Image (spheres, grey):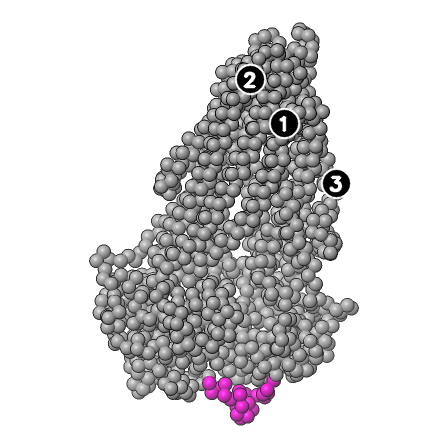
Amino acid sequence: MSATDQDDRETAAFPGQRPPRASVGSHRIEEEIFGKAYDPKTVRRIWAFVRPYRLKIYLSIGAVLVFTATQLAIPLIIGRAIDSGMTQGGNSTNLLWAVAAFAVAVIFNFGASFVQETEVGKVAENVLFDMRRAMFAQLQRVSLSFMDKTEVGRLMSRLQGDVNSMQEFLETSVISVGDMVLLVGIVVVLLTLDFRLGLLTLSTMPILFIVRIFWLPPAKRAFWAAHETNSITAGAMAEGINGVRTVQNLDRQKVNFDLFDDKAYANLRTQLTGSRFAQVMVPIVDSLTGIAMAIVVVVGGSLVLNGGLEIGVIVAFLFYIQRFFDPIRSLTMQYSIMQRAMTSGRRITEVLDIPASINDKPDAITLTRDMDGSVEFANVNFAYDPDRPVLRNVSFKVKPGETVALVGPTGSGKTSAMALVHRFYEVQSGAVLVGGHDVRDITQQSLGEQVAMVLQEAFLFTGSVFDNIRYNKASATRADVIAAATAVGAHEFISRMPQGYDTILEQRGSNLSQGQRQLLSFARALVADAKILVLDEATANIDSYTERQIQKALLILLKGRTGMVIAHRLATIRGADRIIVLQNGEMIETGNHDQLMAQGGLYAKLYNMNYASFDDIPDELVAEANARAAST
Amino acid sequence: MTSHTAGRDRSRGDARAHLAAAHAGKGQSPLVRIALFSLRHPWQASFAIGATIVASVLQLLIPRLLGHAVDQAQGILTTAGEGAEQALFWSAMTLLAVSVARGVFTLLQNYFSESVGHHVGYELRLAFYDKVQKLSYSYHDKIHTGDLITMGLLDLDGVRMFFATGMVRVVLLSVLIGVGAYMLLTTDVVLGLLALSFVPFVAWRSSVAQLTLRATWIALQDKLSGLTRVMEENLGGIRVVRAFSAQDFELAKFDDASRAALELSHQRVDVRVRNTSAMTFSFFAAMGLVLWFGGNKVIAGEMSVGTLASFLTFMTILQMPVRQLGLMVNSFARASICGDRLFSFFDEPLAIDDAPGATDLVVGEGTLRFDDVHFTYPGATHPTLDGVSFEARAGQTVGIVGAPGAGKSTLAHLIPRFYDIDSGSITLDGQDVSKVTLQSLRRAVAVVQQDTFLFTTTIENNIAYGDPWSKETKIEKAAESAQLHNYIMGLPAGYDTVVGERGVSLSGGQRQRLSIARSLVLKPAVMVFDDSTAAIDAGTEHRIRSAIRRYAKDRVTLVISHRLSSLLHADTILFLEDGKIVEQGSHEELLALGGRYRALYELQTRPVEDIELGSAAQ
């Protein structure tokens, strides 16, 4: 390498140093865990979702109580069986009664646990799906300006992750009711069986509470760190897979391997720390159990020896001790689950509370097929952001059946004008009229049925070719779909696909070329059979062969319809009945090709520059043409 | 910083051994390979297994000691008085000591088995990542990225956890059930059999339940990913949805997908609950029998209350591990399937690798030569390139045109050896690309691809991707040449703006310019633009080309484009058709030739629309 090559590269300060401008994946994850564990407002909102299932919830709580009661009763019954039934040489009637009581308890235990687990499990699932549906339905109504600003990934994580932690919360909260009752129950039973012995045994309980209070915060941090580094490593891995071609292309394998190693190693370290924190509780709980048992044996044992206590009570005590610490463990865990649930609940409510800015008027009319099919802009002013107007006092009328080409440099407001016909956004002043009615007086549903729209980027859904062309026009038959595909010239390539119209399009049609995707979206618009067609021509350079097919299809599509086309190709522009030239949000010229050429304005200047498409023209040439147009 | 570096050096030193181990044992069963891989941590593994044995035996001692203490308390074994209290005290102390010891050994058992698992996970991740990076384009062409990610996350997890949830648990259950059964049966055969009667039933139910749950889990994931797809496509294509007023239609689609998933979820709840309830019931039923028969033995004087109590506690201790037997069975099933997939991936041969004794490419003048190159994609019947020959010298620009599928991109991908050719040769300064090291070759050849992949990091790091040691000046210069500098400076965070999946999204044209800047940083000897200016307007493209010419005029440039205006200035234009060069020459020469190039040129310029209108009217 030459000396100049070294000049613009930095050098490693020590062997094994990672390059200064390299990373793999991301360094953080977008989640939060530490927050309030109880937030009445969020709980009220969550309750609204649980309410429809409240009878089942009450039933489960009842079942939990029965279940807990049997758990409490079983050691007692065994104790009684020993004390009253098992005196040497005695008769087995008492024992029989005890065993019968045991059997009853076991049957109740079985029934209660069955009811509780089934109901809670299913209700939690139902609530999860209901919440997700409510959010999804809300997102169908919110304004496009909100959707424009929000990343799909972020919304998806709310639809997925947040509802999952709500489910966890619902499932565990009914169980923790049982845990609480069990805890209180054990305390009461032990103290009733023998107050002194009970008190002594129970003295180990607060120790565990205290230990866990100190243990929890650092343990939670350790678990979180393990979770976080794990997600980061997984993210880096996914990036390595998705970008593998670029990685090989630019020969980054070695650097990436080392950087990935750093992340995976950091994860190994945090996982091991997390393990230590989790496992350290085991000997503590075991030791406390040992102490409790020792107390029962020594104190209880001498009481028995002295005749102050029956042996069955000791056995019952020993049984309770085995179960002693479980509720404490799960109750302290419940706190973290509640924290998580509150955060998720708040995020879910945020989605549900996004206002749907565009609503039908109560007396909105239904636009029918027999309307005339005209489109009119009357003094329309529009802006996404009040300080930056996009359309300024634009007025024009498209007659039924007419094809109008909207032309203008990037940023002139063409796309916004098109969106307004469909009422994706509300105008600031003036009005957009379709079929003679203000779009604000028409139901959005019927407006959508009469105004078909083809977007610049063809968007396909996973599903068969047939489903994609038919889309939501349920009345379209297979013959209609084939006719539409034939009309736009897509039939040939569809027939060549392995299953023809039933071929499943993978990953939004990534197995098709851009031009083919475009043709399918034309066919979709044709099947929708609307009176008005609004179309944003694709700018990307499609190969000339497909391009030709698309031009043909466009003519078919526009036949017998009112057309508004954002045109990029000169061929399309010249084919239009009328051309509207927009610049900086204002309509500056209108007329057919020959008229505009005769006028010698911006259009004529741009046309004379001999570019194949208006969007190809560099900005400064547009400015130049403007200046010249202005001066003439 | 130093401690950080130490860690890095250590891991780097071991990495090679991990990779070798992951690839070892080809042909052996996956479970054997997992076991051998796990045992690469012999000390931790032995500690884990040793601690498991000790902890289980200690656990089994507890019921014995309790039973003993109960009998002592009842005054059966010793005569009442001072001695009895003393004996009780010692029993209690033994119980305490055994409990503490059991806790400590359980800790060791869990910690070391998890530790082995985490180490195995770390090492397999390295091997997996390395393999992903090494496998050639032809492998990545045929596999879904989603499947690879699943393999790297879920399959790897299944393999990683096998030591703890499979191997250690086998030891644990064998000791607990084996020794426990021995102790119970030697004490009292009939009662022992009764006490153990729930074990086979619970083991069976729990295995069936786990295997069913696993099968339905896979089905559920499938349903859920269908639901995810509906939601994602809806949000991603929200404009289409609104344009067709298809909100209700989409909600119906969502409900269908949702209902299918919900039904399966409910089924899973049923399977789980049915089995757990049945297991608990059988356990208590066995306990009831022990209570009845044992109680009668006590009454008959054949057994002490303490022994009965120890039987009952034995059962409580055995209950949990026996229920987890299903988890163990599941762990074996999962490890065997996941391990099979993962190790087959490791066993995948590398289609493209350095030839034995490959030397570094030495770029002198920079002449690229294709000599009768033939290439057919794996699995395809028709050749994509069928005898292509041409030469491009330093400073020359070669344009390539042709219909889709003519082999243009393929030609570009053969130079840096993303695929290997079937016959003929591709040479750079006389050195065959298949005989030089891949690293030196790919440093010398930059392909600016059609689709630009942005990494989730700053713009600066993205531009410096190929050479992360680049200084800022070099990065800025590349961005200036790619006509991206002004845009970047207009961003609030400038070059530190994070782009990619979680960052600012760039337009198609901006992405392509970034991709060009990325290649310029490398100062390659050969630069290939694979239709990489499609989204850039003609004026900007023109400025980029002149900047590149200034930046390095002594390189070979290949330009593949649909837009003929991009090729006007090429020294030679190759017209590809069906993998063959059918026309060759400068723009003027080819126009004069009046062949296919001319037809294409006419298709792209003005008179077209007249033809179109005419033909559509017919």
Q: How many marks?
A: 3
Kindly identify the amino acid type of the residue bearing the numbered disc 2.
Leu
Asked if residue B188 lies in the magenta stretch, the reply is no
Q: Where residue B234 is drawn, which disc sits there?
A: none
| Residue carrying label 2 | A95
Identify the chain of the residue marked 3, using the numbered disc in the image: B
Kindly identify the amino acid type of the residue bearing the numbered disc 1.
Leu
Please tell me if label 2 and label 3 are on a single chain: no
Above or below — where is A400 with respect to B603?
Answer: above
Rendered residue at 55%/92% (across/down): B593
Asked if residue B592 lies in the magenta stretch, the reply is yes
Rendered residue at 38%/56% (across/down): B251
Quadrant of the rendering where the C terminus of chain B is positioned: bottom left
| Residue carrying label 1 | B194
Above or below — where is B303 with respect to A459?
Answer: above
Please tell me if label 3 and label 1 are on a single chain: yes
> SS of the residue at dot 1?
helix
